[in-house]
Amino acid sequence: MDQTHQNGNGVSNGQAASGAARDKLMEGLKTAIGEAEHYLSDAGEQVSDKASEVRARFEDTLRTAKTDLRKLEDSVIARSHEVAEIADVYVRDNPWKAVGVGAAVGVLLGILVSRR
């Protein structure tokens, strides 16, 4: 018997949490890369040898970060497609279970909202 706990979409709670963490990480990386590019363009006026060496290393690190971010984004998109396909197959194979889970979630949310 399957021991994973899944939400109504066929996604395990651990997968949903890791997806949220990945999304947060991706947003953080995008922000950091944007800020780094801004600082790099601001520092463009410095012409000393040390500054140009530091700038070259920084540009290399920035390129690497962008590449890693693209790879992470591609893997997240691929994984989300897999999860969507799994959920679709589950709902098609078990339509009444899916309806029951949806109804149960709706009742629970209704109870929680009415308490407040």
Image: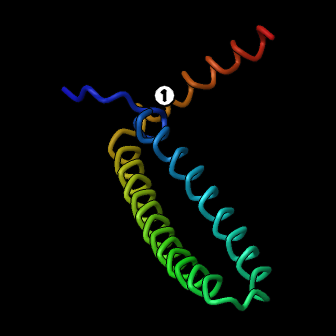
Q: Quadrant of residue 56?
A: bottom right
Vertical order, 3 against 74 (above or below) = above
**Left of 52 or right of it: where is 88?**
left
Q: Nearer the viewer, residue 89 or 47?
A: 47
Q: Pinpoint residue 105: horizontal percent, then vertical percent.
A: 57, 25
Query: Judging from the image, what secondary structure is the residue with disc 1 in?
Result: helix
Residue that appears at 63% across and 57% down: 27
> What crowding class fits label 1: few (fewer than 14 Cα within 10 Å), some (14-19), or many (20 or more)?
some
Residue highlighted by disc 1: 101
Q: Pinpoint residue 112: horizontal percent, then vertical percent.
A: 70, 14
Its colouring scheme is rainbow
Q: Quadrant of residue 32?
A: bottom right
Residue that appears at 57% across and 58% down: 26
Residue that appears at 63% across and 18% down: 107
Q: Quadrant of residue 46?
A: bottom right
Q: Nearer the viewer, residue 46 or 44?
A: 46
**Quadrant occupied by the N terminus:** top left
Q: How many marks?
A: 1
Residue that appears at 49% across and 38% down: 17
Vertical order, 110 against 7 (above or below) = above
Q: Amino acid at mark 1?
A: Val
**Left of 67 or right of it: where is 38?**
right
Q: Residue furthest left?
A: 1
Q: Pinpoint residue 43: horizontal percent, then vertical percent.
A: 75, 80
**Quadrant occupied by the C terminus:** top right
Vertical order, 15 against 86 (above or below) = above
Q: Residue furthest front?
A: 49
**Left of 70 or right of it: where is 108?**
right
